[in-house]
Each structure stands twice: as structure tokens, then as C-alpha cells.
């Protein structure tokens, strides 16, 4: 296996449509336009709504900054640098409020809709994604 180191400073930031931050895409397979999975680092500069990604399972982990307060129709949660990554359905409406200024976060997104008709149900511990999907992923925080 060959490892590739990607430095954030070498990845061009792309502004969000809502103007609330930027994203640096670290990897998208097979490509940036038609990805099955994607990893990125976002700079969140202001409060606002998350982008809507139906058919996508998402993970979010805070890398730096005080953290965020996230509100969905069912839950309210605070995420900090010490929190475990949050997994959620990309179709869920999420409002984000910065706790004390900008944050940097790591995002993993897996496309779960299936154009081939092969679907299965995913129910994992702490998982808010319910229904037919074709993806399985995990994000874990390791310190040390």
C-alpha cells in the first residue's frame, strides 16, 4: 500500500454556496463531480444551515475551534474537539451555531442511494440513518 500525504495548504479552498465557510476536498472517489465517497476539511466561519445531501450518510468531527451547536428537528447536540464524530443522514435539516468563533471540521460523506437497485438496511450503534442504503463507513477519533 502506498500512502499519500495531503497538506491542507496545498488544497484550494472552495466557497460554500451559502457563504458560511469554505471546503478543501482531500479525496473524492471516483471524482469530485460523481463521488461515491468524499473526505474534506471545512472552515466554518458563521452560523447557518448545513447543505442538503439526500441519499448521503455524513460524519462530522471538529478539528479545531471551540465547537458547534447543531439542531435538527429531533435533536440538539454540541460537538467539540473532544467529541466523537457525529453520523447523520444528509437529508436531515441541520442548523449550526458556532460556540465561540470559527471552527475547522473533518467531513466524511458516503453516497447511499443506489442506481443499480441493490439496497440494504443499515442500523449501526448511534446511527441516525434509517432506511435503504448501500454504504457502510466509520469515522473514529484517535488521540495520542
Image (tube, rainbow, N blue to C red):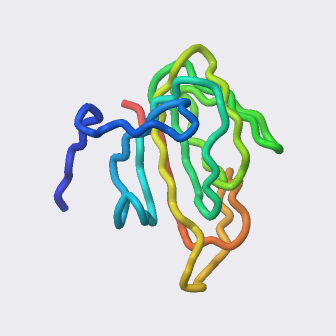
Quadrant position of the N terminus in the picture: bottom left
Q: Which residue is located at x 59 percent, y 60 percent?
A: 56
- Residue at the right extreme, as displayed: 74
Asked which quadrant contains residue 69, the reply is top right
Query: Which residue is more in the foreground, 141 or 13?
Result: 13
- Coordinates of residue 17 in the picture (x, y in percent): 54, 41
Q: Which residue is located at x 68 percent, y 73 percent?
A: 132
- Coordinates of residue 41 in the picture (x, y in percent): 42, 38
- Image vertical order of residue 89 relative to residue 144, above or below: below
Quadrant position of the C terminus in the picture: top left
- Coordinates of residue 18 in the picture (x, y in percent): 58, 36
Q: Is 116 positioned to the left or the right of 144 in the image?
A: right
- Residue at the left extreme, as displayed: 2
Q: Is 4 positioned to the left or the right of 39 in the image?
A: left
Q: Is 26 positioned to the left or the right of 124 in the image?
A: left
- Image vertical order of residue 9 relative to residue 65, above or below: below
- Coordinates of residue 100 in the picture (x, y in percent): 59, 14
Amino acid at each position: 500500500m502506498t500512502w499519500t500525504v495531503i497538506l491542507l495548504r496545498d488544497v484550494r479552498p472552495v466557497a460554500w454556496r451559502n457563504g458560511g465557510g469554505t471546503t478543501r476536498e482531500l479525496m473524492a472517489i471516483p471524482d469530485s463531480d460523481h463521488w461515491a465517497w468524499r473526505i474534506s476539511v471545512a472552515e466554518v466561519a458563521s452560523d447557518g444551515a448545513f447543505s442538503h445531501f439526500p441519499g448521503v450518510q455524513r460524519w462530522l468531527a471538529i478539528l479545531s475551534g471551540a465547537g458547534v451547536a447543531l439542531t435538527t428537528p429531533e435533536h440538539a447536540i454540541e460537538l467539540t474537539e473532544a467529541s466523537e464524530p457525529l453520523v447523520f443522514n444528509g437529508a436531515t435539516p441541520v442548523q449550526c451555531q458556532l460556540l465561540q468563533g470559527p471552527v475547522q471540521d473533518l467531513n466524511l460523506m458516503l453516497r447511499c442511494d443506489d442506481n443499480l437497485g441493490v439496497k440494504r438496511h443499515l442500523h449501526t450503534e448511534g446511527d441516525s440513518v434509517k432506511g435503504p442504503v448501500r454504504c457502510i463507513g466509520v469515522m473514529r477519533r484517535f488521540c495520542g
